[in-house]
């Protein structure tokens, strides 16, 4: 069987840790010789150099942005002239899972001797899904990863749009309202089939169970302790989402697509509840540990000018995040 062209960007090492393939390249996505997104770097830090590592999943790796416009790359450009001793490295991995995050950092990030680690708390909806389905800490990464390693970028970009070219040509000839209705009907049918397979006669949840929120927060606190032990300063951010209770009717199709792709066990209301409660957990952790923190979810404008879908950014959205992190680092004098 011909190798999936998208899978060349990701691999799993002998310890089961998902990582980027060094020197891999596909379309606008390029990996350097150390397995990080972006330009080539030196493993050894120069004297007086400050290293900032950005850790996340697809929203940090970059999806809809133009080449070199993902937010870590834009942050590096903003810092380059006023702070020439600062180096920004994008160590994000599409599909990076919570229960392998520490292992990934220990094996692939610690050798860089980072001073600051910016954490965009990725994949919270998939975390909720794994907890609802009762997957173990080891089992969850294996089952979720099986789908993601197979075709990571195609899964994110497709969003359920796998209809034939013939059908697409026909739909282009239809009035926009009718074409939209057909697309929504098709998506609802997929959701109905997926609910039947996973919800098993139970209604999708409108609220995230409290134990899942507590587990998410506990996981983050343990990770912060680990970074502190290794003399790395964590910088936290809430996880931005486009859709809120106030604009959900304008983005009905995206909200349905989010349910279908990420967590069918949560209702549309439940998805927004998960976003708010788990971001609240990030806010609590940042406050308890007195960490540098940006509330990007509350700051970013909730429009398609900034979002490519519910969780991924346009060039302008990535620039907005980069500017927020730049202002925080500069204001707190973390890089002076």
Image (tube, rainbow, N blue to C red):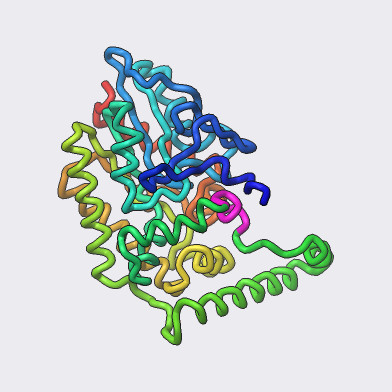
Residue 316, image x, y percentages = 53, 41
Q: Position of residue 63 (x, y in %)?
A: 55, 45
- Tell me residue 172's x, y (percent): 80, 63
Q: Is residue 326 above or below residue 239?
A: above
Q: Residue at x 83, y 66 (%)?
A: 170
Q: Magenta residues?
A: 151-158
Picture quadrant of residue 181: bottom right
Question: Quadrant of the image for the C terminus?
Answer: top left
Residue found 47% across the figure and 31% down from its top: 73
Residue 114 vs residue 146: left or right?
Answer: left
Give the residue furthest to the top.
47
| Dominant SS type (magenta) | helix
Q: How many labels sit on residues?
A: 0
Tell whether position 157 is magenta.
Answer: yes
Residue 97 locus on image (x, y percent): 38, 52
Magenta stretch encompasses residue 116: no
Residue at the image position 63 percent from the left and 48 percent from the top: 4
The residue lying toward the viewer, choosing from 257 and 14, is 14
Q: Residue furthest bottom?
A: 201
139 vs 35: above or below: below
Question: Between 294 and 282, which is closer to the camera in this rendering?
Answer: 282
């Amino acid at each position: 069987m011909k190798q999936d062209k998208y899978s060349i960007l990701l691999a799993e090492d002998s310890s089961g840790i998902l990582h980027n393939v060094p020197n891999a390249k596909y379309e606008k996505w390029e990996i350097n010789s150390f397995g990080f997104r972006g330009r080539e770097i030196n493993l050894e830090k120069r004297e007086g150099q400050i290293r900032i590592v950005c850790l996340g999943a697809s929203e940090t790796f970059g999806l809809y942005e133009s080449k070199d416009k993902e937010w870590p790359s834009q942050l590096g450009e903003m810092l380059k002239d006023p702070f020439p001793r600062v180096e920004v490295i994008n160590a994000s991995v599409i599909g990076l899972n919570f229960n392998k995050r520490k292992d990934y950092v220990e094996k692939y990030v610690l050798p860089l001797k980072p001073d600051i680690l910016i954490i965009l708390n990725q994949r919270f909806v998939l975390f909720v899904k794994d907890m609802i389905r009762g997957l173990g800490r080891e089992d969850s990464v294996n089952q979720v990863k099986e789908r993601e390693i197979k075709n990571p970028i195609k899964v994110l970009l497709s969003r359920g749009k796998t209809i034939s070219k013939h059908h697409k040509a026909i739909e282009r000839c239809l009035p926009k309202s009718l074409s939209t209705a057909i697309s929504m009907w098709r998506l609802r049918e997929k959701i109905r089939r997926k609910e039947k397979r996973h919800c098993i006669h139970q209604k999708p949840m409108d609220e995230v169970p409290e134990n899942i929120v507590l587990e998410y927060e506990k996981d983050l606190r343990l990770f912060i302790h680990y970074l502190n032990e290794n003399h790395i300063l964590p910088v936290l951010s809430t996880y931005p989402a486009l859709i809120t209770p106030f604009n959900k009717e304008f983005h009905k199709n995206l909200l349905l697509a989010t349910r279908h792709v990420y967590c069918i066990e949560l209702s549309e209301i439940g998805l927004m509840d998960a976003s708010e409660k788990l971001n609240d957990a990030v806010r609590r952790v940042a406050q308890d540990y007195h960490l540098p923190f940006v509330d990007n979810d509350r700051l970013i404008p909730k429009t398609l000018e900034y979002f490519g879908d519910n969780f991924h950014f346009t060039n302008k959205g990535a620039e907005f995040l980069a500017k927020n992190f730049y202002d925080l680092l500069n204001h707190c004098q973390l890089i002076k």
